[in-house]
Amino acid sequence: MLRILCLALVAFVGLTPVVTAQIYTLPELGLQNSGACPALAARERTSKTMVPLGCLNTSSKTWTLTPGKVTLPAVDQGSTGDVSGMSVTVPGENVARTLLGRLADIPLSVDSFRGGACAGAVDDTCAVQAAIAAASSQKRELLLPGGTLTTGAINFPSGVTIRGRGEGVTTLKLKNGTNLSLLTSGNAYSLYGTGSEGGFFDFSLSDLTLDGNRANNTSGDCLAIYGARFRLRNLTIKQCPDIGLRTEWGQYGDFPMEASFNNILIDTTGANGADLRGPHDSILDNIVIVDAGQKANNTYSQLSISGFMNGRFSKVHTWHRSTVANRTIYGVYDASGSNDFTNSHFEGSLTAPAYIGGNFSQYSDSVLYYAPWGAGSSSIILAGKNNKVNGTILGSIFMSGQPPRIGVYQTNNASGNIVNLMVLGSTIAAIDVSVGDSGYNDYKIRGAQSTGPGFLGLFADTSSVDIQMFGATSNSRIAKDASIAPPASSGAACTYGQRAFDTNFEYRCVSANSWKRAPLSTWP
């Protein structure tokens, strides 16, 4: 029994390796018979030295080893067993923790799950799925190894942390002929479109590449999520048969629901590059989307924002390679509204780099809108209400050999917007309101162009207009305050500079509460 005890101590705990021992000599053992923690010591037969091994705590029924006195063999001695319940105190710490507890501090590895039910698997699907399940149940991080893991469809639950060794270092690749989404949060597809506030929460994906293997799959998204309060960081998402990144969630929640998206590259997708429909109030930073919409020309968007999604976007860049087969209809499709954009560039789409169709969005002075690639198209389509649209438009004059284009095309239902833009090189017009101005808009446009009028169409009486376009062939300047009702008398209340008109007269307030008028007439 004493020999078994000593061998167990030698096998399980140690601080320095032993490179020889295969022959054991039975020492003399002594155990104190009093004290809170009676000590066990071994006497070496030759030197007669007593070596303390630890003590037995009779109250807690635990064994405490003496640091530095027990060593592990350098090679496997052939013993097996479950030691997860053993408590260990690390030098410098003052709390004993079980080995199982300490293992929880170490990320799980997919390589630990290639045996058992996954033995003989022809790809990595079983091992990756088993590792995710274990990470969830044990509440441990899953660290994916370097290299390419080829899998079928993979699902993950709430609360997991999945991390690779770096973009381009760890790649999760959809195997040939799967035709399903590569990575999905639980049953996301059954929740899409329901408006549910359920779904999956508190998970994190980072530091890896997701490869949808578009050349060998005809359908499937790369990353599909229904849920909130998740973290996506340092991801490359590429070659997706359908959507690159798809997210959605319900409208409200009485808890923090914001997700964060940081340092994400989406490169080449069949449909939308990113299709974001929630969660609202999310934070998105350093998002690059290139060559989305390869299934059909002028059909999909690089970045589509709809549903209950609204976010704080910073450093977004959407673009196309010059040799791409198909181009997106929009660079950013803002249908949900209440989005904020700063330090962002939109370029390369056919119809418009930016479609602003929601309400209450804000685009800062640091946003750049390039000319679209389609003839007669516009850099911005403004179709929503109460938006603030700032920034700079670089028109077709800056794109050698490209056909003429419009700066801003406004639909007839846009109203209450504040538009403050520098428009450079749009060769049809800086702004086109020919389909109608619904009014209560505030336009301030400055810029230069080599040909074409500064503006097209008639502005509503209730809109304020201040346009100056150097080089325009016509309509190069207009300054018009929102019209007010004609005064009933020359002494009607007014503020200097106010103007009004009716079918017979133009009225001008020349000083406080003092109007003058001039008759209107036709001429040859």
Image (tube, rainbow, N blue to C red):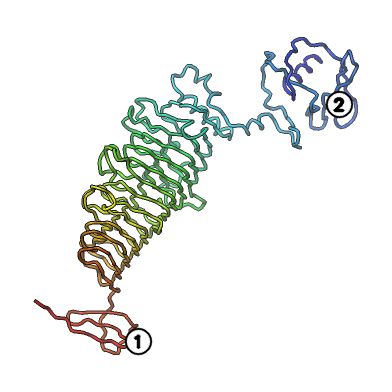
The mark closer to the camera, 1 or 2, is 1
> Which residue position is annotated with label 1?
512
Horizontal side of residue 13 vs 499, given as left or right: right
Towards the viewer: 441 or 35: 441
In the rendered structure, find residue 57 and report the number of the disc placed on it.
none
Give coordinates of residue 277: x percent, y percent: 39, 47
Q: Amino acid at mark 2?
A: Ala
Q: Position of residue 426 (x, y in %)?
A: 26, 56
Residue 49 position within the rendered picture, expressed as x and y whole percent measured from the top left: 89, 19
Which quadrant of the view contains residue 101? top right
Going 43% across and 37% down the picture, which residue do you hit? 236
Which residue matches tag 2?
39
Q: Residue at x 41, y 45 (%)?
A: 248
Question: Residue 465 lies in what quarter of the image?
Answer: bottom left
Q: Residue at x 39, y 35 (%)?
A: 238
Q: Secondary structure at mark 1?
A: loop
Q: Is residue 350 above or below residue 524?
A: above
